[in-house]
Amino acid sequence: MVVALLLAVTLFAILNPRVFLSPINLQNIAVAAPEIGIIAIAMMVVMLTGGIDLSLVAIANFSAITISTLHTAIATTDPDLANNLGVVIVLAGIAVGMLGGAFNGFLVSVVGITPILATLATMQIYNGIAIVWTGGSTLYGAPAMLGAIGQAAVANVPLLFIIFLVVAVLVAILVNRTALGRMIQLEGANPVAAQYSAIPRRAVLLKTYTVGGLLAGLAGVLFLARNPTASADYGSSYVLLVIVIAVLGGTNPTGGFASVFGVVLATLTLQVVSSGFTAIRLSSYEYAIAQGVILITVMIFDSVSSSRTKRPKKLDPQLPSEASPTEAALLRP
């Protein structure tokens, strides 16, 4: 993914350097990547167990709608109080995301529904509730602190991008340095071995999907930080995009292995490609084609690389393959 990112940057810098390398465009990439990247990291965590969560974008929207609704309801009577309660309102939105993820985990771990079907159903449920809640219209309004975060920068680096990197580091620590992370990886790599290792499968899956919901709720907060509006259909194209990013970043679709750093690089690569296509005036449909081409190319490369590493060593042609050491000594000239 490092090579892919460098190639993408070089290509579009050559094709249209005036637009692509402009400070505004580079800042737009850094501002747009975090919300997609955090949902992709949430998808990665769930895919580590061998599952999938199609409802992450719906959860993010549900969290954003919750925050916007609470803020607007309080602001109609006391705008200052609404802004003073900004942290509480944001935490309430993230809590809604956690509850949505926990419900997914309950369906998968306790009820035993296949993850893709369980989360497809909850995606429809969350989207439906959001549409009924908002009446299908866009909600306006968010705590002032979110607008300040969305516009802030540290050394010309958007604060949203810094938050994205911090979240990535924390998730990497969770996955690689904690007992829960090890159990999540083992559950995805070998469920039978996990069972015989006395790993509490139901608890692990429930916690995994809850973490995914928490990250989706945080992504909903970033939705509002970028633009103080919330709607049920925001980011509808993200559902498949975050799966592509997770797989491109090195996540094994069958579980057991993932790389947070790889997901961050994959997020930046696809965001660079999207921005580059805009710079050279290509359509979103052509960008969708590019996503598929990039995914297939990376999967082919991984398949070829893994087949080479797994290729068995050649046996001594002078010896039968089943010969014992004693027989081999007798057969040698």
Image (spheres, rainbow, N blue to C red):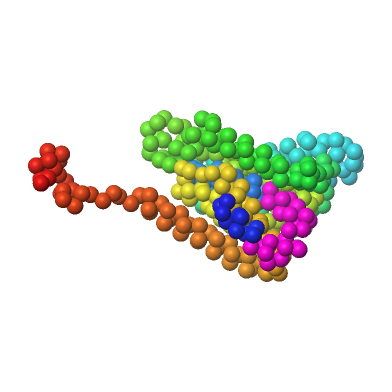
Indicate yes or no whether the magenta region holds residue 24: yes
Could you tell me residue 316's position as x and y percent?
A: 20, 49
Nearest to the observer: residue 193 or residue 309? 309
Q: Residue furthest front?
A: 333
Nearest to the observer: residue 298 or residue 180? 298
Indicate yes or no whether the magenta region holds residue 328: no
Could you tell me residue 291's position as x and y percent?
A: 58, 61
For residue 198, above or below residue 166:
above
Taking the image as drawn, is residue 181 in sight?
yes
Relative placement, left or right, of 49 versus 23 is left
Could you tell me residue 88's position as x and y percent?
A: 77, 35
Q: Tell me which corner region of the image, top left, top right, bottom left or bottom right, holds residue 105.
A: top right
Identify the residue at image location x=50%, y=61%: 296
Identify the residue at image location x=78%, y=56%: 24
Nearest to the observer: residue 199 or residue 105? 199
| Magenta highlight range | 11-34
Report the predominant secondary structure element of the magenta stretch: helix
